[in-house]
Image (cartoon, rainbow, N blue to C red):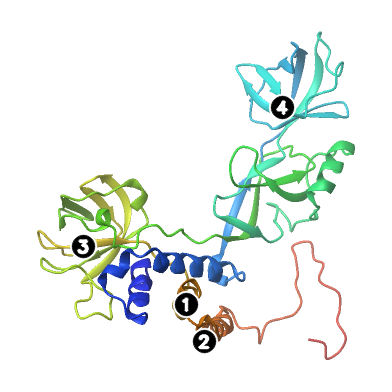
Amino acid sequence: MLTYFDVVEHLITSSFGGPQDAEQRDIRTAVQRAYAEVTQIRDWAYYHVHGRVITTPSESVTLIDMGSNTFDASGSGAHDRVRVGERVADVASWSMGILTTGPLHFPAGTVSANGSQATAYTTLYPLPADFRNLDEPSSEFHWWSGIYVTPDQAMKLERVSNTSGPPYHWTIVKDPDSDGWALKIFGYPTSEETIDFVYRRSPRPLRYSGHEASARVGTISRAASANVIGSGTQFSSDMVGSILRVGDTTNLPGPITSIIPYKSETRISRVVSGTTVVTDASSTIASSTKYLITDPIDVAPHMHNVIYSAAEYWLARIRNQKPDNAFAMYQRDLRLAMEMDQLAPLSGRSPEVWNDHGWRSPLKPDGGA
């Protein structure tokens, strides 16, 4: 597989550098910028994945005003909104029967000290940490009937609409409890069901090029099964998902194009300690074998050439060495990668789409595509 190590070595070779160039910041910067640009320049088919959220049923609760936006409220504590009549507040915390509202608190006098009936519900559902964007969600029992609304429209809907259950309107907002995003839906769910969607994920970040001391210090041997035992190694938890490349007892593993290419490679699935890792597959490793750990370039095979040429362009740009020539080759490889980014043929497929309610898309003119 293509790795961070391979692209750094490629830049060292193409720029006529020596082994010491592996430590130069401009080479690493060029790879990082190329990787970020190519993977985000379009919605590549490689990053389309299936996502799911599970709705949380609403519940009726009794609120007793305790002052300072704090309320006595027995309930599950699993909701982010609470409604009394037509007024809605957000839930900042809800534990041990005590509910505290956040910045969107109730106006004074909304909740009686003697108890007011309220509906607690959930509108925000965190999306995967690698989320970039998504297609229209689909409910559990039928094709989606709701529509996308902007965050501004979502705010207005929540203020004036007290609807519950599907069909849901939806939008994407910043998740207030993390650095990621959340799916926000209206009206509020009254039962548990799955909402599925196809989304574009972000690529795995690059950290280890394999030239760092911690990524190649010491030696390794195979203990049993998929366990790899190190001697003098510095394995760390952030190496999970990285690639372990195996050399021999004398030489570090080089790229597949080198005079001394790696003997085998496998992905690290778990780091047990600084001297033990578990890999996806077992392979024969002699005692006191040299190795290196590097991060995979998380792209499809037809994107490999454009990663190389984009890195060359960025290195030329950083070094101010006629980047226009490198840019032309980068654009050529990018165009070819885009042309190959097709997983299913378009010919021979019916243009009509049926759903489980029996309706279909409108009739098209004779001879229409």
Residue located at (52% from left, 84% from top): 333
Q: Is residue 213 left or right of residue 166?
A: left
Look at the numbered discs 2 and 1 and tell me whether their residues touch, using CB distance below 8 Å: yes
Q: Amino acid at mark 1?
A: Ala
Give the SS element for disc 2: helix
Residue that label 1 marks? 316
| Quadrant housing the C terminus | bottom right
Of 110 and 188, nearer the camera is 110
Looking at the image, is mark 2 or mark 1 earlier in the sequence?
1
Residue at point 58% right, 44% down? 179
Secondary structure beneath dot 4 equals: loop
Q: Where's residue 81, x and y in %?
A: 74, 31
Q: Nearer the viewer, residue 82 or 131?
A: 131
From the image, tell me which residue sits under label 3: 291
Which residue does the image show at 21% across and 62% down from the upper left? Answer: 291
Secondary structure beneath dot 3 equals strand
> Which circle, 1 or 3, is nearer the viewer?
1
Residue 102 marker? 4
Q: Quadrant of the N terminus?
A: bottom left
Q: Work out how far the residue at label 1 is from the one at label 3, CA to CA, in angstroms.
A: 31 Å
Report crowding for label 1: few under 14, some 14 to 19, many 20 or more residues within 10 A (C-alpha).
Answer: many
Camera-side mark, 2 or 3? 2
Mark 4 or 2 closer to N-term?
4
- Earlier residue among tags 4 and 1: 4
Amino acid type at image mark 3: Tyr
Residue hosting label 2: 325
N-term mark: 1 or 3: 3
Q: CA distance from mark 3 to mark 4?
A: 52 Å
Closer mark to the observer between disc 4 and disc 1: 1
